[in-house]
Amino acid sequence: MTFTFVTLFENLIAPYFEDSILKRSLDAKIIEINFENPRDYTRNKHHKVDDYQAGGGAGLLMFTQPLFDVLRHIKQQDPQAHIVFPVPAGKPFKQIDAKRLSKKEHIVFVSGRYEGIDERVIEVFGDELFSIGDYVLTGGELPSLVMCDAISRNIEGVLGNVDSLMEESFEEGLLEAPSFGKPKKYEDYEIPSEFLKGNHAKISTLKNEMSILKTQYFRPDLFCRKNIKH
Ligand code: SAM
């Protein structure tokens, strides 16, 4: 899978791939990353990448021409490239999207800056628009990384243990059951005794019940959608 980041600030993204799982995936050539800087596509003398908004309005927008040119270039190179715009107005990015997008061959994330991107760029090139939450960030680099990370761990070979994907939060529309490590008593705190008895069927039932209760408590919205009967 290839990820292309269209960004004015490559240095905000690149270091994330210098360690841990995504570095190993890069080294193993399971994923590949590219960067495209709209500044390299400017046609004005001063390589300006911001511009005033038509009709006025607070703040600047990313300059339209370099974005058209860089995205056209990417599409010419790879007509199948799937172009994603992180924007506050996008649909909420979910685990189900991460799984679906992990089957693509090439995803392009276009990071907005300033007050955002000319709507025409988004309409012409956007295959999907995602928001990572109801708040406004200074740029699209973090959302792009968040989505890239979530997508990558669903690509075969990225996680050492594929089983860890199965019991995770959101898999069955529920949050994952609480996890406990060792020792069985740490300071004054003990783990549930059932976890120590070695009856795996019972542990599995208990985990399922805890998962339901945890979802009900922390995410009543998910719980209602799941329509669980007690
Ligand atoms: N004026 C825009 C608005 O009110 O919707 C906000 C622009 S924001 C300061 C600059 C860029 O950050 C956006 O173009 C987008 O790429 C990114 N961004 C900010 N918040 C985001 C969010 N919650 N989800 C996804 N992208 C976001």
Image: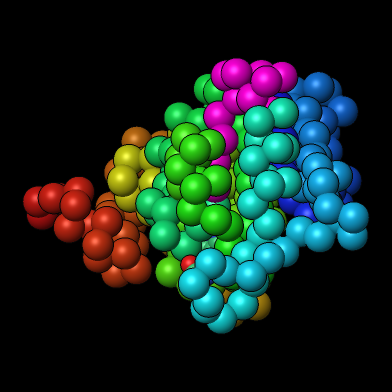
Across and down, in percent, residue 42 comes to 81, 48
Across and down, in percent, residue 46 comes to 89, 60
In this rendering, the answer to whether 170 lies above or below 201 is below
Q: Quadrant of ligand 1?
A: bottom right
Q: Which residue appears at 23% of the width and 57% of the height?
A: 223
Q: Is residue 205 magenta?
A: no
- Horizontally, is 28 left or right of 199 in the view? right
Q: Which residue appears at 58% of the width and 63% of the height?
A: 116
Q: Which residue appears at 52% of the width and 78% of the height?
A: 57
Residue 217 or 205: which is nearer the viewer?
Answer: 217
- Res 51 seen here: yes
The residue stretch that appears in magenta? 74-85
- Horizontally, is 86 left or right of 11 in the view? left
Residue 47 or 139: which is nearer the viewer?
Answer: 47
- Horizontally, is 132 left or right of 32 in the view? left
Residue 108 or 182: which is nearer the viewer?
Answer: 108
- Horizontally, is 199 left or right of 18 in the view? left
Furthest-left residue in view? 229
Q: Quarter of the image holding residue 17?
A: top right
